């Protein structure tokens, strides 16, 4: 389908393969994410949410099954091609921001573009400034990230994840380390970006309050999708 | 961020700047290592050159001598009746056959710079009750001065010689109680006997030489030593002192006479110099390795500290090569900057050394030359060492699995 961003077909993933402690974390997952979707991935601890996110984000390879990114079969790609595809199509936001402390907010947002093009240029800088404007951090663009608050850092991380205009943004508990107010702010920011640019969002959360505000909620229990549909209530 | 800088350089310099304390420590470590190498090399090279210069000051690089005289027993009529013992001949003072023809031939040998015929032999210097045995050298001053720079070594009088003049060393002058303008009688066992006027007193830096060597004109020496028109040796200097033996062999092959290079006549000295050179190399390598290990350990720590950031860079699309280059460049920068700092420290230490260690007369103990090429070499080698030291940490960083790095 043309608006498909990501498709998983019977994806399996185990840890400690071929060892006595082998543990299958994902059991035959089928899942499709479409352009413009805003979905929450919920489930108890140890249900395989992060593993699923890593597989979808091309950070980890499935042991079995197929993963298509924008219709492209990723099982046939080598390491280099995977890195390139990941850089172009998927943005990440993690529970911890993982910004580079040696760089300013603006430079951090430029980083994916810099990795892509090799050298910085004015267009990158302008793009980073626009993104920082979007997340409300224009006054702090020249601050080193360690001088920003937790909420601000996470906003920079969101701006960075959007730098390549990825069709999909994966977030692993992006508000997990934030107080309620900052968490709401980051959530609303993602919502706005989703509406404005059509970027598909999938974010893992433990916060039922936030999950309830999503139009699609996927629930994972013991490595299986037990429910997948529009928000409850 | 400078727009001309590629990502790897930007990240490398930022990481170094961020880890200020680590960077400072490793730069100091690298600088000290380079300083030790540069300083020791300069001192050792200076010392060796100094020793060589001093020992070659009063001797030619190559000395050509007449063929040794051998005893030739008359064959007897009875077959198998060889003599059981043939006593070696005592070597007379002989002139080199046709030395006037040989001198220009030797001059044409590649690598030869100065050729000077000398007649030399033993004599007694007699003045009043003092009677000293000396070694008389009859020279052609213009050529000979280019082998042994007598004009530079005069402490009294002049080096210019007329046929009735003689140059003596400081010790001999003292022993004879003579000064410039005084007359000294010289007598040889062969019956030579002349009275000469001291026109100059030299100091060649060695007591033995100052006590024994006297210089007269070639003609005067020939008369005194009873070798009319003769030259007992031909002294030669070469362009490259280390090639002396090769040149000596070439001369020997060309003129059919024995030519001894200073390398052959000072073999023990040579072995000592070589041992010194080898120990210097071993020292340099050891210091180099310890500097490399220092750089490597700091970078390994940096990789561990930055593993999450590296993981996220990888997740954002950084290739393994880009990550690897970031750490290789850091190693290279530490090596390069450290080497310039180290060369600076070494230059300062050498100045101090020159200022502190002096001869009794106030001149520096020996001249140390701070070769700018040495700095460039040190920079190149230190940069390569830094790069090599960074290989393991860089590969470790490049191998980081983004998932594992982020989760760690």
Image (tube, rainbow, N blue to C red):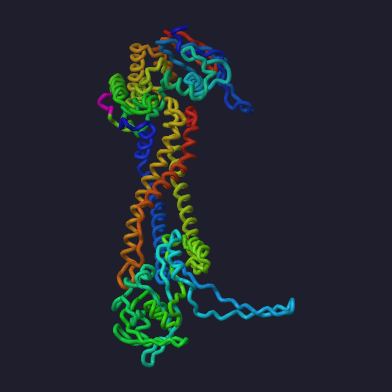
Relative depth, front residue between A201 and B29: B29
Residue B407 lies in the magenta stretch: no
Viewer-nearest residue: A161 or B69? B69
Quarter of the image with the N terminus of chain B is top left
Residue at the spot x=47%, y=47% of the render?
B293
From this view, report whether residue B393 is shown above or below residue A162. Answer: below
Q: Is residue B408 above or below residue B25?
A: above
Residue B268 seen anywhere in this rendered image of the structure: no
Q: Nearer the viewer, residue B143 or A204?
A: B143
Could you tell me what secondary structure mostly forms the magenta stretch? helix
Q: How many labels does the image show?
A: 0
Residue B51 location (% of width, % of height):
42, 67
Please provide percent x and percent y for residue B31. Answer: 38, 50
Q: In the depicted view, which residue is nearer to us: B333 or B363? A: B363
Q: What stretch is highlighted in magenta?
A: A137-141
Tell me where residue B172 appears, x and y as whole percent. 37, 83
Residue ID at (46%, 73%): B233
Q: Which residue is drawn at 62% across and 77% down?
A: B72
Give the residue at the far bottom of this rendering.
B129
How far across and down, in percent of the image, does residue B232 sit? 46, 75
B21 vs A68: above or below: below
Residue furthest right in the image: B79
Quarter assignment of residue B211? bottom left
Query: Is there any visible trace of residue B230 in the rendered image?
Result: yes
Would you place residue A133 above or below residue B134 in this image? above
Q: Quadrant of residue B100?
A: bottom left
Residue extending furthest toward the top? A1
């Amino acid at each position: 389908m043309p608006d498909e961003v990501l498709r998983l077909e019977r994806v399996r993933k185990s840890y400690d393969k071929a060892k006595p402690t082998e543990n299958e974390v994902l059991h035959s997952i089928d899942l499709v994410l479409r352009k413009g979707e805003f979905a929450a991935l919920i489930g108890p601890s140890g249900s395989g949410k992060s593993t699923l996110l890593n597989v979808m984000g091309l950070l980890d390879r499935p042991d079995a099954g197929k993963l298509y990114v924008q219709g492209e079969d990723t099982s046939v790609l080598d390491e280099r091609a995977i890195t390139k595809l990941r850089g172009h199509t998927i943005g990440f936001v993690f529970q911890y921001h993982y910004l580079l402390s040696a760089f300013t907010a603006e430079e951090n947002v430029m980083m994916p573009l810099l990795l892509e093009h090799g050298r910085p240029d004015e267009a990158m800088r302008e793009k980073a400034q626009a993104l920082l404007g979007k997340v409300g951090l224009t006054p702090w663009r020249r601050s080193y990230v360690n001088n920003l608050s937790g909420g601000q850092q996470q906003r920079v991380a969101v701006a960075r994840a959007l730098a390549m205009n990825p069709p999909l943004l994966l977030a692993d508990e992006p508000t997990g380390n934030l107080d309620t107010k900052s968490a709401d702010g980051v959530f609303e920011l993602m919502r706005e970006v989703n509406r404005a640019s059509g970027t598909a969002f999938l974010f893992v959360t433990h916060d039922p309050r936030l999950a309830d505000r999503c139009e699609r909620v996927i629930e994972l229990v013991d490595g299986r999708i037990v429910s997948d549909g529009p928000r409850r209530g | 961020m400078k727009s001309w800088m590629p990502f790897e350089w930007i990240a490398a310099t930022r990481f170094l700047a961020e880890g200020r304390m680590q960077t400072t420590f490793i730069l100091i470590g690298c600088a000290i290592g380079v300083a030790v190498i540069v300083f020791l090399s300069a001192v050792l090279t200076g010392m060796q050159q100094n020793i060589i210069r001093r020992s070659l000051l009063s001797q030619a690089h190559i000395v050509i001598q007449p063929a040794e005289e051998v005893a030739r027993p008359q064959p007897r009529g009875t077959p198998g009746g060889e003599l059981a013992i043939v006593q070696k001949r005592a070597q007379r003072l002989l002139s080199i056959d046709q030395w006037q023809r040989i001198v220009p031939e030797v001059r044409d040998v590649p690598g030869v710079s100065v050729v000077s015929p000398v007649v030399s032999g033993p004599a007694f210097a007699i003045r009043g009750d003092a009677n000293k045995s000396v070694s008389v050298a009859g020279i052609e001053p213009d050529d000979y001065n280019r082998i042994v720079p007598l004009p530079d070594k005069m402490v009294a009088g002049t080096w210019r010689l007329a046929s009735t003049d003689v140059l003596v060393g400081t010790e001999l002058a003292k022993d004879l109680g003579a000064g410039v303008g005084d007359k000294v009688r010289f007598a040889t066992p062969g019956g030579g006997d002349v009275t000469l006027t001291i026109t100059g007193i030299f100091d060649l830096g060695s007591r033995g030489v100052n006590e024994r060597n006297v210089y007269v004109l070639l003609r005067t020496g020939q008369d005194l030593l009873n070798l009319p028109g003769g030259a007992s040796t031909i002294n030669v200097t070469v362009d490259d002192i280390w090639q002396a033996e090769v040149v000596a062999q070439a001369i020997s092959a060309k003129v059919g006479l024995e030519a001894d290079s200073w390398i052959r006549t000072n073999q023990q000295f040579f072995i000592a110099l070589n041992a010194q050179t080898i120990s210097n190399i071993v020292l340099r390598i050891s210091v180099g390795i310890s500097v490399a290990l220092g750089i490597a350990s700091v970078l390994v720590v940096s990789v561990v500290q930055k593993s999450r950031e590296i993981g996220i860079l990888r997740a954002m699309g950084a290739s393994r090569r880009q990550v690897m280059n970031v750490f290789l460049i850091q190693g290279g920068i530490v090596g390069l900057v450290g080497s310039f700092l180290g060369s600076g420290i070494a230059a300062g230490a050498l100045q101090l050394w020159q200022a502190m260690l002096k001869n009794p007369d106030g001149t520096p103990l020996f001249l140390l030359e701070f070769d700018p090429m040495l700095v460039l070499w040190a920079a190149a080698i230190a940069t390569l060492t830094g790069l090599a030291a960074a290989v393991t940490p860089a590969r470790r960083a490049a191998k980081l699995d983004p998932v594992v790095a982020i989760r760690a």
